[in-house]
Amino acid sequence: MKPQLEIEVVDLVVGWVKKNMQTNGNGHVELTENTDLMESGLLDSIGFVELIVFMESQMACNIDLTDVDPGEFTTVQGLCRIALRNDQAGKTYASSH
Amino acid sequence: MTESTTFRGLIDGFVESVNRFPAREALVVDGERLSYLALQRLADKIASAVLQHSEDMSPLVALLAHRSKTAYASILGILSAGKGYVPLNPKFPLERTRSMLALSGCRILIVGKEAFQQLPKLLIDAGRPLTVILPDAFDEGGLSSDFPQHQFVPSKKMADGDTFSSGPKINPTGIAYLLFTSGSTGQPKGVPIPQSSVRSYLQYVCDRYDVNETDRFSQEFDLTFDLSVHDMFVCWERGACLFSVPEKSVMAPAKFIREHQLTMWFSVPSVIGVLAKMRLLSPGCFPSLRYSLFCGEPLSAAYAQRWQEAAPNSILENLYGPTEATIAISHYRWNKTRSPEECVNGIVPIGWIFDGQACSVTDANRKAVPVGVRGELCLCGSQVTTGYWNEPARTQEQFVQLPGAGESPWYRTGDMVQQDADGCLYYLGRVDHQVKIRGYRVELQEIEAVLRRACGTEQVISIAWPVENGSADGVVAFVSGANDLDHDRVLDHCSRVLPGYMVPRKLYLCDEMPLNANGKIDRARLVCILKGEEK
């Protein structure tokens, strides 16, 4: 079973992507935690950077992608797991958005 | 010896490298490593198939594939067969691909497996019978029965090729490749590049950067972008190895550069911005790079400085050149102490025209302006093509004679520049509505033509937005006079006919367009609205 914290972070990210995704012809793309945000066209590089900035501000942590394969961090789940690895504080996020 | 026997075509450097370094790695793609000999064998097989089906003597072969093993081998195969290649992009909308294929007049189409899904739709309305070569398919499946008007050549019908090391004779004026750029009338325009132009480029650049067989080149650019020609052929000219950057790493290639110890980097400057924002650009993080080249859009001083710190052992150059002048035609070498002073509006100069090529900065009457005065940059020389593909009117407009500058045609770039007393060129903007979005050349009028049809109104303005450090990342549009506008339907239509980078990110519906003192739509005011929204 997935830890509660991960579920909360996934919800946080999915909520942000739904609000900020590019609308150009992507209405048909189903957004799940395994959707590749870049390949699906939901986010471009700038959108992706904005998502990271948002996650860092919400989670009060630095997301370090230095040694991570891009294939790993472009899905919601991959990005959330990396963020949680970087997040030492272990807070809850449900109330922060 | 006559010129035709000594002329080196685009393919000849690769062939020489096969002979010199058959076992050295030529290509790393999708986790696979291919030696020069292995890559040549694949290319020869494709060249054989092309020659076997070239009854109509067409000089061009189209290629629908995306940075795959088959894509690279096909480019080499087409050139080995003495033809020019026309790259088509599986990421582009079908309608655009269909239009490019029709305009090219190609009767042979090579398709990589990454484009199999869209192939049937493309074939339905191809306009003329095609020979479709499928190196990645063992057999043609049901294609022959579904499309009896076309002929299919799957891999089982492709014989191993002869070695084309002595290949068909290359004609210097023959086309090496035909690329399509955005056209203001709503239809892409073809730019044919002769073998002799690309040979001039290769010779100059290989010497300038002292390329050798131990080099490891990046390959980020789509094959429909002429900067990919630099990646492939500068690399293979000297026996170096080409590293195709996986699609997922194109946005953030930091780990890829380190893992593969690349020595030659070439990309659009916006990659620097993304890496910096993701904090993947720490000082000294790319020690292996010995050259870092940027092209395709304005390079900001801040980005240049940042990259230079990340790649301290590399020489950083800003290259400039429209497709019509073959890849790049001017360069500026960054110097961390001197260069920040030399930037205009925080943008790195585009520098000096390559030796042997010529430039002139002209006024509206096409007369050369004095040093320091702004004007349109015009180009002439062996790297400059002679005109557009089957478009005499456009050719006449853009390729002109300049008063007192001889008989040779000069290409009017549409770029506003000024030149200092030392000959250094400074890019100041466009004289028209062409913009660069993530390095791609875009005519805003082309987007507006599509929007007008979709919205049923003439009052449409598109604006490159957001712009950061001199580079646009996308486009937005303002629409007026369209009641009950269905945003999703309009944007869906745009994404069916325009490549992703040209599809507006957002539509703004306004009651009426703001006008300036001359009664023209006030674009500056619209930009202010966008800036206000940003705050």
Image (cartoon, coloured by chain):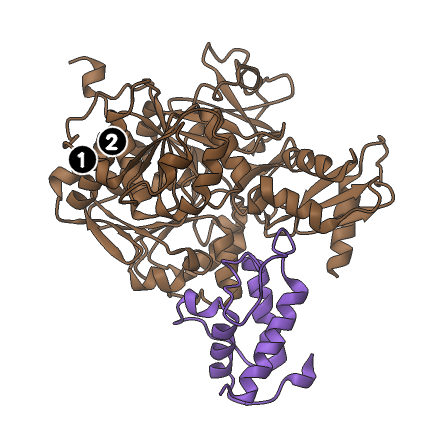
Chain colours: A purple, B brown
Asked whether residue B364 appears in the rendered view, the answer is yes
**Quarter of image, res B457:** top right
Return the mark for residue B159.
Answer: 1
Instruction: Residue B455 in the image: state x and y as whole percent.
Output: 75, 40
* Image marks 2 and 1: residues in contact by CB distance under 8 Å: yes
Asked whether, in this view, residue B90 is left or right of residue B373, the answer is left
Residue drawn at the location 21% of the way across and 36% of the way down? B45
Q: Residue type at mark 2?
A: Ala
| Residue B205 at least partly seen | no
B24 to B331, vertically: above or below: below
Q: Which residue has dot 2 on it?
A: B49
Question: Where residue B26 sits: x, y (%)?
Answer: 22, 47
Query: Residue B275 — which label?
Result: none
Quadrant holding the N terminus of chain B: top left
> The disc labelled 1 sits on which kind of residue?
Ala
Is the same chain shared between marks 2 and 1? yes
Point 47% across, 75% down: residue: A64
- Image position, residue A49 (x, y; %): 56, 64
